[in-house]
Structures are given as C-alpha cells and as structure tokens.
Image: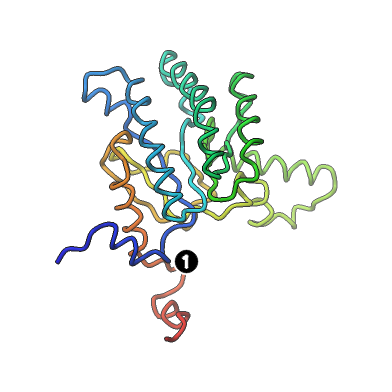
Amino acid sequence: MSTSIDDRLAANKGQLPKHVAIIMDGNNRWAKKRFLPGVAGHKAGVDAVRAVVETSARQGVEVLTLFAFSSENWRRPANEVSALMQLFVVALEREVKKLHHNNIRLRVMGDLSGFSERIQQLVREAEALTANNDLMTLVIAANYGGQWDIAQAAQQLARQVQQGTLTPEQIDEQALHQHTWLHDLPAPDLMIRTGGEKRISNFMLWQMAYTEFYFCDAYWPDFKQQEYQKALVAFAERTRRFGRTDEQLEEAEPSV
C-alpha cells in the first residue's frame, strides 16, 4: 500500500530541515508558456510564496530564505526590473501585517542601498514591526549575491586589522562567518531550486557548505504545498554525514 506525502512527513517529523533556502526560478518561462508577459509570472509567483511560507510554519521550519532578487538581476530588461520593484513595494505594504499577525519575523538580506528610499523605508518598518516574532523567520534575499556577502565580510575584517583591533592570524572561518549575513541563524539544511536548472547562481555560497540540494522541474508559480512537501520528504530521507562515515554515524546514534 502506498504511503501519502502527509504520512511520510509525519513519520520523518524529527528529520525535517530547520532552515530552508529557495531559489524561486521559472516565473518568466511559466508566463511565456501561457503567452503572457514575464511580469505575469512574477505576480503568479506570489501565491507560491504564500503557500511555502504557510507550509514552512506548519511543518516547524525555523528559517525560510527566499532568493527574490539577485545582484545580477539588475541586468534584466528595465521594464521587468521596474515591475519587480513595484511588486516588492506592494508585498511590503500588504503582506507584512499578515506575517506579523502570524508571529513571523521578516528580515531582508542584501545591499539595500541599491533600492529606492521608499523601499528602504518599508523594509526598516517591516523589520521593526516583526522583530519580536518567534514562530519563524522569513528572510528575503534582495540585491544579494554570495560573493558580495563574503567580500563585505572580508572588508569588515580588513578594517579591524587596519584599526589594530584584530591581527591577520586571528582571522579564521569563525571570524569571517561572524560578518556574513544570517550569522546568527542556523545554516541552510536544504536548498531548493525550482524551474529545472541545476546551479546555485551565487546564492549563499558561504552558508551552504553542507546544505542538501533539491532541484525541481516545476516552475515557481506551480511550486505549491504538494511540491514543497515532496522536497521536505526527500530531505528527511537522506543521510547527512558532515564528513563522517556511515559507521561513525551509527556509533553516534543513541541505543534504544
């Protein structure tokens, strides 16, 4: 007898990821397939965001990070970039109160100086409003790139060396980590990319050293509850070794 997705999730509840990171890919192709402008795909993707946020909160995910706009996305056609900025404003104006009502904290990760003052102000207000919420943290990566993240961390360390508060010998992985974004949150356990592409596109390069990857053919607007649950089950049924052997993992398991 086949087991449902819900049953498999329930059976693996203790093995679900604490932090899920998602590259939301395929909006333009979803729209093109329906002979619609690309902006229609981005608008349709908002429903998928709501579904994934709701499912994450229900399944006990502690952190959900969504790659909304990369530092390379500025290269897209001007009308598309403008439409994305308008969607960002609308989302900040309409969705934040819902997040707050559901005890979800919002953080925006990236170089906010690239955005308009209106967007920067809305981000500040949204983060302040939801700062004390503790059911789940929703991170929106906007004007973000993994290489930029590492570079800005290195710059901060260089300033400390220049000021004499740090020596080069004191710079190690932990020192650099403390200056990367989300250093105060658990690293991603699971990274999902929709849309069929199999690359990480400069997303959280430092943080994903031991992240499990899951690539899905569904375009982002079609990535709703069932597709997301499949990804969570796939993660729960994997073995994570972190450099150890299977025998070491078995020895570390508590005896029944």
Locate residue 14: give its quadrant. Answer: bottom left
As shown in the figure, which amino acid type bears the numbered disc 1? Phe
214 relative to 88, above or below: below
Q: How far across and down, in percent of the image, does residue 98 sit? A: 51, 35
Which residue is depicted at the point 52% across and 43% down?
A: 102
**What quarter of the picture does the N terminus occupy?**
bottom left
Q: How many labels were placed on the picture?
A: 1
**Looking at the image, residue 48 lies above or below residue 11:** above
The colour scheme used here is: rainbow
Residue lying farthest to the bottom in this orientation = 256
Query: How far from the left and from the top, in percent, is residue 109?
Result: 57, 37
| Residue at the extreme right of the image, as rendered | 164
Q: Above or below — where is 177 with respect to 84?
A: below
Q: At 74% across and 43% down in the image, what residue appears?
A: 158
Q: Residue lying farthest left? A: 1
- Whole-percent x and y of residue 224? 31, 41
- Residue on which the image places disc 1: 242
Left or right of 93 in this view: 195 = left
**What residue is shown at x 42% (from left), y 20% (from top)?**
76
The percent position of residue 252, horizontal first and vertical second, equals: 48, 80
Quarter of the image that includes the C terminus:
bottom left
> Which of the pair 224/186 is nearer the observer?
224
CA neighbours of label 1 inside 10 A, class few (<14), some (14 to 19), many (20+) = few
Badge 1 element? loop
Please, which residue is most extreme toward the top here? 79
